[in-house]
Amino acid sequence: MIQVSEKAKDKILEIKQTEKRGEDFHVRVGVKGGGCSGLMYDLEFDEVLQPTDKLIEDQGIKLVVDKKSVLYLAGTILDFSDGLNGKGFQFINPNASRTCGCGESFSV
């Protein structure tokens, strides 16, 4: 479903430790309307599971995806970049037919 790169795993674990987030916190990944291409990625820590959430674990990282977002995120890789062109989490999404220049929004 969603894969977590080694860099993303390391950064998530670092942030969890810095923010003192315990084992009960997972990473909520979703898609919402907005951005210049129509859809935006949403990424946050959460400790509440909704009945329609799908729980995925990769590289020891627990990801939770809401039912609506599952279709948009199938096959996606969550990565982290700290290069000169920007720093932050990146979504490598094979379902995106178009992305904006900053990579934060997409369309299918």
Image: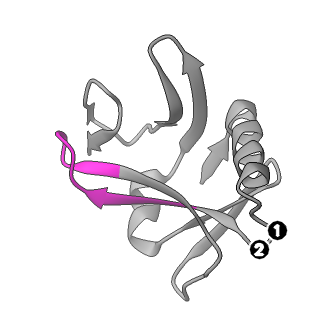
- The answer to which quarter of the image holds residue 69 is bottom left
Residue 64 drawn at (x, y percent)? 60, 67
Q: Is residue 31 shown in magenta?
A: yes
Which kind of residue does numbered mark 2 sit on? Answer: Asp
Give whichever of 50, 19 is nearer the camera.
19
Q: Residue at x 46, y 52 (%)?
A: 73
Tell which residue pokes out farthest to the top in this image. 84
Q: Is residue 73 shown in magenta?
A: no
- The answer to which quarter of the image holds residue 5 is top right
Q: Is residue 26 above or below residue 76?
A: below
Q: Is residue 56 left or right of residue 44?
A: right
**Disc 2 element:** loop
- Dot 1 corresponds to which residue? 23
Give whichever of 53, 41 is nearer the camera.
41
**Disc 1 element:** loop
- The numbered mark at residue 24 is 2
Q: Residue at x 50, y 52 (%)?
A: 74
Point out the stretch of residues depicted in magenta. 28-40
Q: Residue at x 38, y 70 (%)?
A: 68
Which kind of residue does numbered mark 1 sit on? Answer: Glu
Q: Residues within 10 Å of mark 2 (few under 14, many from 20)?
A: few
**Quadrant that contains the N terminus:** bottom right
Q: Is residue 80 left or right of residue 106?
A: right
Pointers 1 and 2 in contact (CB under 8 A)? Answer: yes
Residue 106 drawn at (x, y percent)? 28, 41
Q: CA distance from mark 1 to mark 2?
A: 4 Å
Considering the whole magenta stretch, tell me its main secondary structure.
strand
Q: Is residue 81 above or below residue 20?
A: above
Q: Residue at x 67, y 37 (%)?
A: 8
